[in-house]
Structure formats: C-alpha cells, structure tokens
Image: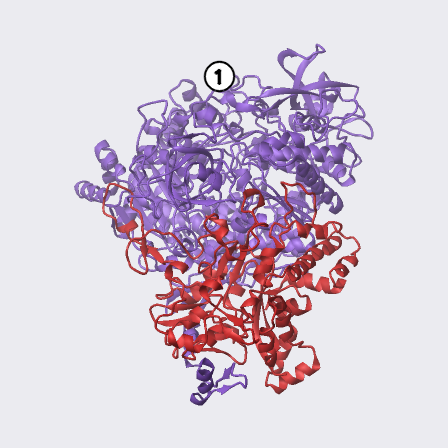
Amino acid sequence: MRVMAQMAMVMNLDKCIGCHTCSVTCKQAWTNRSGTEYVWFNNVETRPGLGYPRTYEDQEEWKGGWVRTPRGRLKLRAGGRFTKLATIFSNPKLPSIEDYYEPWTYDYETLLNAPAQEHFPVARPISLISGKPMNVTWSANWDDNLGGSRENAQRDVMLRGITDKVKLEFEQTFMFYLPRICEHCLNPSCAASCPSGAIYKRSEDGIVLVDQDKCRGWRMCVSGCPYKKVYFNHKTGKAEKCTFCYPRIEVGIPTVCSETCVGRLRYIGLVLYDADKVLEAASVEDDHDLYEAQRSVFLDPSDPQVQHEAQQAGIPADWIKAAQRSPVYALINRYQVALPLHPEYRTMPMVWYIPPLSPVVDVVKDTGHDAEDRDNLFAAIDTLRIPVEYLANLFTAGDPAPVDAVLKKLAAMRSYMRDINLGRDPDDSIPHAVGMDGETMYDMFRLLALAKYDERY
Amino acid sequence: MSQALVGTRRFFTRAEVSPDGRTMTAKGGRAGDAFYRDRWSHDKVVRSTHGVNCTGSCSWKVYVKDGIITWESQQTDYPTTGPDRPEYEPRGCPRGAAFSWYTYSPTRIRYPYVRGVLLEMYREAKGRLGDPVLAWADIVGDPARAARYKASRGKGGLVRASWDEAAEIVAAANVHTIKKWGPDRIAGFSPIPAMSMVSHASGARFTSLIGGSMLSFYDWYADLPVASPQIWGDQTDVPESGDWWDAGYLVMWGSNVPVTRTPDAHWMAEARYRGQKVVVVAPDYADNVKFADEWLPAAPGTDGALAMAMGHVVLKEFFVDRQVDHFEDYTRRFTDLPFLVCLEEYSDATTEGGTPAYRPGKFLTAEDLDGDAATAENAAFKTVLVDSRTGELVVPNGTLGDRFGDEGVGKWNLDLGEVLPALSLLDSATETASVDLPRFDLPRGASEVVRRGVPVRRVNGHLVTTVFDVLLAQYGVGREGVPGAWPSGYDDPDGLYTPAWQEPITGVPAAAVARIAREFAQNAADTSGRSMIIVGAGTNHWFHSDETYRCMLLLTTITGCQGRNGGGWAHYVGQEKARPITGWAQMAFGLDWVRPPRQMIQTAYWYLHTDQFHYDHYSADSLAGATGTGLFAGMSTHDQLALSARLGWMPSYPTFDRNPLDLADQAEASGQAVGDFVVDQLRTGQLNFACEDPDAPQNWPRVLMMWRANLFGSSAKGNEYFLKHLLGTDSSVSAVPDDDDLPKGKLDLLCTLDFRMTSSTMFSDVVLPAATWYEKHDINTTDMHPFIHSFNPAISPPWQTRTDWDIFKTIAEVFAPLGAKHLGVRKDLVAVPLLHDTADAMATPHGRVRDWAKGECEPVPGVTMPKLVVVERDYGAVFDQMGALGPLMEKLGTAQKGVAYDVKREVDYLLHKNGPVRGGVADGRPSLKDARHVAETIMALSGTTNGHLATQGFKTLEKRTGQLMHDLAAEHEGKQITFADTQAAPVPVITSPEWSGSESGGRRYSPFTINVERLKPWHTLTGRQHFYLDHDWMQELGEGLPVYKPPLDMTQIFGEAEIGAQNELGVSVRYLTPHNKWSIHSEYQDNLFMLSLSRGGQAIWISERDAAKVGIRDNDWVEAVNRNGVVNARAIVSHRMPEGTVYMHHAQDRLIDVPLTEKTGRRGGIHNSLTRILMKPSHLIGGYGQLAFAFNYLGPTGNQRDEVTMIRRRSQEVQY
C-alpha cells in the first residue's frame, strides 16, 4: 500500500440549473486575457449536445486517453512517445479554433463615437483572432438548452447506439447540464503525452499542472487529454489548464467554480488512494468493470491501517482528518451515488458526478406515476425522460446498472423524506430496498439537501 | 521503440521513475506556478452588489488590484437560516459575475454627452440671449430647429460636453418647462427602488421637489399582478425563497425559476430531496422542467382554463363530495366565501320558468339590514354573512366599515367570537334561483350566458346567496337540490370548466389535470396548507392576467395555503421589496419638504403620449360579458381612461390643459376656494383634463429624466410608436391611425444617466455618465431573502462619472439659481387621486359608478373627482432641500399602508448621526449630502430597520385591531441597523407593520402570516381575501368571479393573420418575450461574456416544425413583421419549442449586431418593436375598497403577451 492524497470534486448534476456562473467566475479569475479568449477552464454543456470543443468525446476522431492492449497494458490512444516524437511538428489530432469557437468582440465604441448619420449606430462582431468583422456561427455554448437541436443535439456522440430509445421530439424532450473542469486524473494521459515533461501531478494533493516555464507548446497534451481540458494559449505559445485553483486551495478556500456555484452542487474533498493499485485498476479488461475498479483504489480513511500507512507516507494528521470528513469520499464510496465521467478513457478522473434524477413522468402518455408514492417509486425511474442508457454512456462506459442504482437511491431518499416532512412515521423498508438503512439515508439527505458550506468543502 | 525511449528517460532526468516505468516523481521545479499565484493576488476585497432589476440582491466580493477592479465572486456570509435548512450562500448568477466587464469596457460612458446639433443650437442661442432658460425657450419654441434636433435622435452625433454645460442644459429645460407648461409636464422614470434605494431616490427626490411626475414601473412592466390588490388589497407580498423549503407540493406555473431566480433555484432543487413534489406548467421544455416530476405543457395564454378545471376538481372533491376541516375553517374565517351577495335583475329576459334572469350583484351590506346596523357608521362598507349556528344575519368585525371611523376602533379584526359563518345557504335556504354567468371560451371571444342555480334567501327584498354558492355555480359544481344544467363528470367535454373541457384548449390531458389538482389539495389537507404555486411572467404578462391569476389563486386560497409558511402564491416577476419602504418613500418623494408628490401610472402615460390610443380600432364594450348592461357602449379605452382620471380613480398628469402654477394663481385671484374654482372652470368648459386631448401642445410631456432605466431598449411596449410620436425620429410603425395629422416629437428633452450605452442613451439629447455599482454607496433589499446589505465603492468613480445621488445634486445646484430667477416661490395645484389605505376607499359605495361629467352626480373633489391640493414650491431652494431632511418629518410624521408614525426621535438621531447642514433654508436640519446619509435616513425611518418604529407601528395598529401585535417586533425594539452594519455583512430585517408577514424568531418570511395568526384584516372591502368583486365595471366585464378569458384575438382586433397561416411574410406565430437567460432585461445582453456564452446577438427561438414550414435553419437571419414594427434576428431552431409560438427573449436591445431590415431599410427593432400597449379597463378602477390607487399598487399594466407576428427567412446578405 502506497497512500497518496488527492483533491477531488463531486458535482451533483441533479441540482445543476445550467446557469454558467461557474464558467464566468472562473473565466474572470483566470482566462479573461489575450491568448485565452476562447479558453474556458470551466464550461457547462447542455446534454444531449456537442460539448466544447465540439464532439470532444469522439475518441475515434480525437484519439485522447488510454487504450488497453490485448496484452493488458495501457497505451496512449494517440500512440506512444515515438509516434508523438514523429509527429511533433504537425500534431494531426488537434481541435481547430472552429471546434472550440472563434472568439470575438464588438466595435462597441461606435455606439458613442458614431458621427451624425442616417441610421441608428450598431456594434458589429469583430474577430479576436483576425481583427476583422465576422459572422458569429459558433460560441462557447452554442447549443445551450437544445439550441439548433437538429444540427447539434442530434449529433451527440453519446447518442450512438441508443437512437432507438431517444427521440428528439417536443413531447419527449429532455436535457440536463454537464459542468466540466479538468479531471485531475490519477492516470493523466496529458502528462504522459507531454514531450517536455512540463505537465506534472503534485504529489501532495494530486493537482495536475502545466509548468509554464517548461512548456514548449507542442500541444501533445491537448490531443492526449480525452476531455479536451488542456488549452493552447496562442499568445504565449504554452499550454494552460484548470489549476484546481491551487493558490486558493492551498490556503483553505474552495475553487472559484465551487464556491460560486449557486446550485450548491459542488463538493470538494480529499481522498486517500493506493498509488500501487492505480495501474491495475486502469487496466481491467472489461470497460464495465472500470467504475468499480476505480472505486476500489480509494482507501477508507477511517481504517486504522490506512491511517497508519498514510502517516508513514508523510501525510499530515490534519489531512487524514480531512479525508475522514470528506464529502467526496462519502458520495463516492459511502453512499455510492457519484460516478466518474468516462471511465472508459482509463485516465481515472477525479471529478465525479451524481447523475440527474429529473423524474418527469410523461404527461403525454399520462402514465399516472407519482415519484413520491412508494408503490410507484421504481416504476417512475423507468419512465425517466433522461434515458438511463444515455447517462450510462457518460458515467459507466455504457453499463446501466450502476446508474439505475444511483437513481433509485435518490428517488428512495425523496420518498423516505416525504414521510418525515409530513410528520408521518418513516418507512425503513424504503432505504432497505436500495441497500441502505434509515440513518445513512438521512445523513445522505443532509449532505445533498442542506449542503452547508463547511460540509460541501 | 517508444518503450526504449521512455526507458532511457530515467538516465536523463533527476526524477525518480517508478519500477513500472509509468510515473516519474520529481522534486522542486515549481517556479512556473508563480504565474497563477500572481494572477490570484489582489490588494483588497470590497463588498458590493448589483443594482439591477432582478430581485437577486446578492452580496458580492469585488477584487481590486493596483487600483483596478479585476473580478468579482459571491459573498458567502449570509446569516444562517438555522441548522436544518439550506443556506442563502452563495447567491449570484452568471450575469452578475460578468458585471466588472463594464467598468473598463468600450461601451462605458466616461463623460457627459450632448447631441451635437442641439449643443450647437444651445451655444448659439445662449450666446445671443445670455441666459440658459431663454436659450432653451428659443430653441424649443422654434418648430424648425426643434424638429431638426428631434429628428436626429438616435442617429449618432453625440459630442462631449462639460459637466457644467450639460447640467445647465438640463436645468434650463426643466425651468423653462415649469414656467411655460407646468411642472407636471416633467416626468422622471427610474424603477425598482429596492435594487439601490439611494440611487432611485436621487432623481425621484429632485423630480418630486420641483413638482414633476414620477412614473410608476411595476404596473408598466406588467409585473404587477392586478389580482393581488383585487384579492388582498395588497400590491404583492410573497414568500422569501427559503420558504419554498417548507412546501410539500410546489407548482412552478409560468415562472422559469433557474433563469429568472437563479440564486434561489437551489431551494427548489433541494426541497425535492425532502420529498416535495414539483410540477411545472410551461408551454416549452423550459429550464425548470428538468426538475419537474410532471410537466403540463399548457398552450400559451390558456393557464386560466387549466386553473378553472383544477378549481372545479378541488371544489367538487374537497368541498362538495367531502369536507376538509382545515379548508372549511380557513375559508370561513379568512375569505369572502360566506358573505352574502344580492342577485340582481340585469335584463328584460326571463328564465324558462318565467322568473327574471338574475346575475350576481352587489354585496349585501349593513345598510340593507334593519335597525341600528343600517344606520351605523360606514354601514355601506360592512358586508354581511349568516351564522350557521343560529341562521341569523351577522355583520362581522373587520370589514372596511370598521377601518377608518371612530366606531371601528378596536374592531377592525377577524375575530368572529362565537359566530360560525355559513359557507353555503344550501342547508338554510328557503328557495333556489337561477343566476346567469358569462363565459368567454368561445371562438372569436364571443361571450354567452350560462344559467345555473343557487340556494337563496330573502333579506329586506333582496334575493341573496353566498359567494361560495355563486362560486360553485361559476365552476360548474352541482349539488343535490340545486337546479340547473351541470357537467356530467370530469370527462364531459361540454361541461364548462371540467378537466375534459380544458383539454382541447390547453392541450393538457384531462386525467393529468384532475390528478394534479387532487394531489395539490390533498397535500394542503395533509400539511394544513403547505402547497405552493410559484407564478411569474409566463402567466402574468397577458392582457387578462388578472383573471388568470384569480383562477390560480383560488387554488391556494380555498385550500388554506395563504398566510402559511410553505404555502400560497409566490409571485416572482418584477416584484420587489424595498423593505425599509417608509424611509425610502420620504427620501424619494421629498415628503420631508412638500406633500403630496405627483405619481403617475406609466402605462396610461405612454398610451396617450405616444399616441397608441389612435391605433386602437375596437370599442371597450367588446370586452364586456354576456351579462353586461351596456355600460361601455360607445366608449373607447381612451374614454375609459379619461373617466378614470376625472373621477379621481387613477392619477393623471399633466392634469389640466393649463399650467398648474397659473391655475393656483388664478384660483387665488378669484377669491374662491380652489375646489370651487376648478369645478366651475371644468363645468363651463374653460378648463379641461389634459388626458382628454393629449395631442394639444399644452398637454405634451416636455421633459423626461431617466436613470437606472432603459425605456427605449427594454420596457417601451410599442417601441416604434415611442420613436415616432414621442421622439420624432425614424420608426417602423405600419399600423394606420384614426387621424392623419398626429404630432411627432412631443418631448423636448430626453436626459438619461447610465454607465453604458443603451437605446435610451443613444436616443437621448443629454447623456450623463453614471458611476457603476462598484463605485458608490447604496443599500439593497429583496423579497427573495430577508437581509439588507450595501453597495460600496471598490474604486472611486473613474473618468468624469458621478454617482446618481451626486448627479442630481449637480443638476439641482445649477437649477436652483435659475429657478430663483425665473420661477421664485410659486403655488402649485396638485390633483391627487383617491388613495388606497385611506378613507378615500369609501368614495364609491357599492362600486356604483357615477360620472359628474354626465350629470350623474355632483363633482366633489376627493369624492367624485380628484382631490385638489395647493402646495408651495420654493424653486430657488431645491438644492438646499435635496441635501437636508425637511421639517415635515416632525410636523406630519410618516405613514405607510394606513399606519402613521411619529418620527421626532428619529430626526433627532439623524441630526447627530449625519450631522446638521449649515446655512440656507435647511439650516440646522440633518444632512443628506452624502449617499451614506441618505442610507442612514432610510434605515432610521423604517420599522424594518429600526425596532422602535416597528413596535410603535404595531402598537398603533393594536388600537385599531384590538389584537396583540407589538410582540412581533419586541425582540428587536432596541435595534437600529446602520450603514456600517450593512457593510460588515447582510443584516436580517425586523418584522414591521409595513409588511404582512413575520420574521420574528428567525422565521422564514411568508406573506399574510400576521393576518392569519393575529387576525388582522386584509385591506379589502370585507377585510377578507376576495373571490368576488362587485364593482360595476367588474360586473360589466363579466369578471365578478374567477373566469377563463383566452388571449386577445389579434386577427379579430387588428386583422393580423391567423396563427399558422402562411403568406409572403412567412408563417404567423404567437410572439412571446420571456425573460432571457443571458441578461437581466437589457443589462448584460451587451456584455461580452454573456454574448460569448450564447448566440452573440438578437435571437428568436422557433420550433423545428414552424422553421420547416418556411425553410428556416438554425442561425439563419430571420425577419419578424407585424403592424407595430420589424425585428431582424438570428433563428434558434429547437425541438424544445412548441409549434405555433416563437420566443424573442426579453430586452434584446438594438445595439448589438442588428442589421438593416428588408422591409424598411432601417435598423431592426427590439423585442418590444412588435408589441404595443393594450389597456384593460378593470385596471383603471379606483376609489372603492381594495380597488383604490396607490403608486405601483394598482394601475393599468403594460401587458405584451397577446401579440402575434409573421416570421420568415430573410436574405442572408445583411447590411449594417
């Protein structure tokens, strides 16, 4: 056992209102400067949708992340270092600026400065790349709320294979939001892709950073990251990425995106993991086993042996305490309601998600389900507007079982709490039906619903 | 090979490589991290907030580095809500997070600007005449020159001016206008004081002191739910968002909470985890549908039908088939359901049985009874019910008749003693009768009569029944023993107001409606009233939204949810809560120096002054119900408005076709009393109401001062009519007026204060550079949370910008000497409407309308016409008055909602807190020179921030109600919130009689909890919550009771194409303007961050089905055209939109990427270029019970939802 500590995040998508406050506060704090106009360390995607950059999840196209060889070893999908070296001057797998979006501004000054003229003055879009007038045809969030759904949502990579279950028609509409930052992976393919060794993962907290002195701008990290969360600053010629706000984290303040999240859906916490088990977990054969394998890498911070080993590894006592009260550990391992984003990339991402419940019962079919009614509880899950298969493609490499289990826990919590809310006796058969006891379910309720500041972080 | 390369790596690096060759561990080498550490470092963090019209009231941290504002993030230090609830942190939204962009952006207004052509004229005239006022008079008095600068409005050519010169022009225009036309030809517009009370008060104080009219906003924005005064006698009072947590059942109905209440939405998401069920009613798959257990996609504007059907189910299952204790008890005590209504013959028609046809008439009052009751004080305003224990008639406590007279002292309460009111007469009735009820659901808006039975009694010749009995008849809920044709069941499509009836109207399945209604009521029964409906713009911005709301609010009221934490209505659109409202009102309206101020209903103001009334081609009686008596025959909406003005129902400024200063002088010279003089002049036709002929030059508005507002890029319904008739510049109106020779360019001066360019600054003659929200001191509250907190300057106002307070001080300073020279001290005749929460509410017994102009009664100021008050204005002292608290504070005190306050103690406190002013007319008075002084004064003069006043007010109220109340504020009696407190952290406010809910003991605010728990009457006729309204006009409109009225038929009224029709202009669709995800009204829609996260300019959402009909693809340029104007925008095509409806989100100004249109070759318009003002007569009623005017309380709404447009794909080659 080699205990290491990792700062990790869980986002409860069930609470995300898609407001993009996180994106704006992050951008204002970190990337509102020349060279990074198009860069959003934090972005929010409407799903189904194409994401940012467009179709980044299509690894057939972009070749990000790792693949498992028939011999059970991991290799970069884009090829090993030799391939990288061979293609270092013409990296073929980079999203173009159009795949992100061509950043623009407006000639705002004309509104005040316009001389007397025939028409009311107007500010026109001007490209921040070329400085010339342009037509806006794509933005950082073009397909927000299913905008242009035929051209966009329809082509969502995650819809492949389940188009028989998903119809983009008015009566069957569904959507949810997916906020994304760098995953600060345990097995980061960006770092492995860097010819300069400029990307490193901090040993004390696992934050993955680009050394701005060492970076030579090869952009192999951009290709290597399957989440496309490393960006190229076209002014400095260096790669930049989400830093997990380390200047804040180091002094005990949450990341900007977390603290400013008005949906109160982000949790930050320390997790302890066994560094010796990372490779093994990332290399399991069946994609469907990756979720459980990743969970198994985390160590139980209340286990005396783990605490002992952690101390031996030089982890301070207050960090071990932090791991014990970590909401992230609780959501991933104690309540088991958080899931990793795209475990099949085998990077072992450290930003996990609680899938959205959104138990809309289809009014058009008038099925009559009431999500709070214990008799209908699980039937309601089956009539979710958001198909479980779609969520499984995002969070469990296509295996619907873990997603289904999470959604049932959330639905059971609502049903269980309704009795308490209305002053009736709680019914313990409800938590039992999803493998929990009443107290654990109540604790989970408090963490998800009350979500006080000092319990979120 | 690659393995080998990596393998060799370990020999070239000092790092330690893991045995599997997968990881390397290096030490040090973190110098590169310094970049982000530098980026994060800053010098200070300043608390401020955003003075934007969103009700968010979020406290922010503004970061400053090297004297530059760098960015902002949310404060998280709100006082706790308690251990078992979520907290308010971290309130904010993406719009607010992007605000600092404006500080240094190229759209920032850095200097004063004047339109070049006007500035040249002014300099020339002043050089020639040597006096600013004479110079202004010279320009505007010359039709050619005036037309020239007016026609250039909006077309560039703004040039920098000095502060001295710009302020001089503004002051001169005001002085000249007062002198030549009268002070009531000046208007000020600034909305929503709660968002920055001092800034709002700045210009409002100046405008009020000089005698100008402050324009209302809540009604103008169509955010005022007129149903609220109709039902409760209250403008709007709603729960804070933390109270959503308490609800067991939550319906979001036309309110897209994640978008429009972003900082509050988490309460909804989190309450679901407590087992709350969430239902959404929205025509599209709106953002909040994501959170809903059920989605009812009701067709736009049909919400009233859905609500009527739900009401049908609840009345049948929970009142008739069985009874629920909580509902029975609640409706008897707190609603007008048990009160008796007289049936009246209304036509010559008879029923089949040969008896007369009746309709529900007036409330039975004590006047109609025998003996002492009939002769008691205010008997006509004491309504009557039946005690079910004795069968006797009872005049209960708490009606309007107990509110103002001496006999009512200690009796104005809801204490019924032993009386148990009978909801129905069914048990005690001796007979039944048929009543006629109008329906409006038929094609083309035709109204027909439905005839249904009610149990009745006879009282002194009156045939009476209860409101409850009439309500059951209205909702089609039959009972054994009651005659008439009733629906056969929920599945009866012809049974009016059944679930099956509404299905073809709304598109929502009947079974779903019945189920949701049942669940809603059952939850209320299970929780004693914790069922809540959040309502908003989607249901409120319609012409008939008052009726729609009454249908919806019936659901929360009969189920006993109002006045309960976690229950009742939650109206969230444009509602605000300037919590220290009494203090703010003194500052804003200069009540410390001169009373009364002029306050005008803005919708009517623009309906007249932008000549939109000339484009109405329908008569008012087309709105009447089938049980009407021809009351509106031959009347236009304009006639109704004029009647409302001359009867004193609503304010009307300019009031007369004569300068009110001259009128006051003439009255004095005549030797007559003012009232007599004016009445004589009116009778002989020498004097007329200005609103009767708004096109006569002496009746035009001449000066409009605007701050914290963007009329021309946002709220101006009928935007193109404004450009044409008010401003006299280019417009795209194609509608045909009833008169060819209408005035153009009525307004002489448009002056706007702002920190960014908008349509309003672009069209302005003078633009003054304002400080932003991060550059001034101010205070901010909302009803969404219970805290008061502050604005503070992170930096000083940069360039030549100034705070609003300082700008109006600057203007006043230049104005005062010009005023002294040209005006001096003058008398001003102010016409005041009959006011709510005063005895004026008893001016119209039984709501019987009598028009003195037709000889139906005598013109009596303050009874059958406006009050006439002469005030003195010292125009040379305006600057001194601006900057000091005036003497009327001690002399007259303050008043709010019928409660008077003695504030001598507070004035003394402020004298020491703010310090005295030295010299001038305000010598020795408390200073208001600094914005912080104003903030302290506001907070010292309100019970919400001064515990002494809260307890004083409750004690005053105790005398009238005879109920214990002052304990509600006792816990904070010694608390005075200071500005320093608000700088440290958001501070919880104090329970005060200024509002209807209690926060005592840290409780979440829910409206009407004081009414329900302390038996304090509502400010209505019966003192109860009203389902029934017996005013003549309400009866004529067929709106005595909740009823479904469909959207206006624009094909019938204006000849627009039928929805779905196609022609060369494209396809005809319903045109809705819901609130925008990427802006707060027009604020932020020009912000680069918001534009980068959206589509980068004006956009219209359209369904895939409609887009396919006319070949529109996503991001195509489209042109939308109707008679009101033209819009060019990009299309967003999505399957989440319903067929037949497009959305152009609210307040997309014309400044960003708007091309020239194909239709006119001119610049495309804004969202409101396709709308226009349509006034509903029921909103004009005044002088009767709860239907009485108060500023922003009651007035015609500027609704805009009923509109339609043609839309098509235009040429993709656009020109600018």
What color does chain B have in the rendering?
A: purple
Query: Measured from the top left, where is residue B427 in percent x and y?
Result: 81, 26
Q: Which residue is mark 1?
A: B854
Tell me the kind of residue under disc 1. Lys
* Residue B416 to residue B947: above or below: above
Q: In this orientation, which residue lies closer to the viewer: B515 or B178?
A: B515
Residue at the location (76% across, 41% down)? B326
Determine the residue located farthest toward the front in the rendered image.
A70
Q: How is the image coloured?
A: by chain
**Residue in the foreground of this view, choosing between A83 and B130:** A83
Judge whether B135 appears above or below B921 on screen.
above
Element at badge 1? helix
Q: Residue at x 61, y 73 (%)?
A: A284
When the figure is inspected, residue B497 is found, relative to residue A315, above or below; the finding is above
Report x, y in % for residue A18. 52, 55
The answer to whether residue B1186 is seen in the rendering is no
Q: Position of residue B921 (x, y in %)?
A: 39, 48
Mark 1 neighbour density, 10 Å: few (under 14) some (14–19) many (20 or more)? few
| Residue found at the far left of this picture | B128
Question: Closest to the observer: A290 or B16?
Answer: A290
Q: Is residue A70 left or right of residue B602?
A: right
The hue of chain A in the figure is red
Q: Determine the chain carrying the residue at label 1.
A: B
Task: State left or right for residue B960 relative to residue B944.
Answer: right
Question: Residue B521, image x and y in percent?
Answer: 71, 41
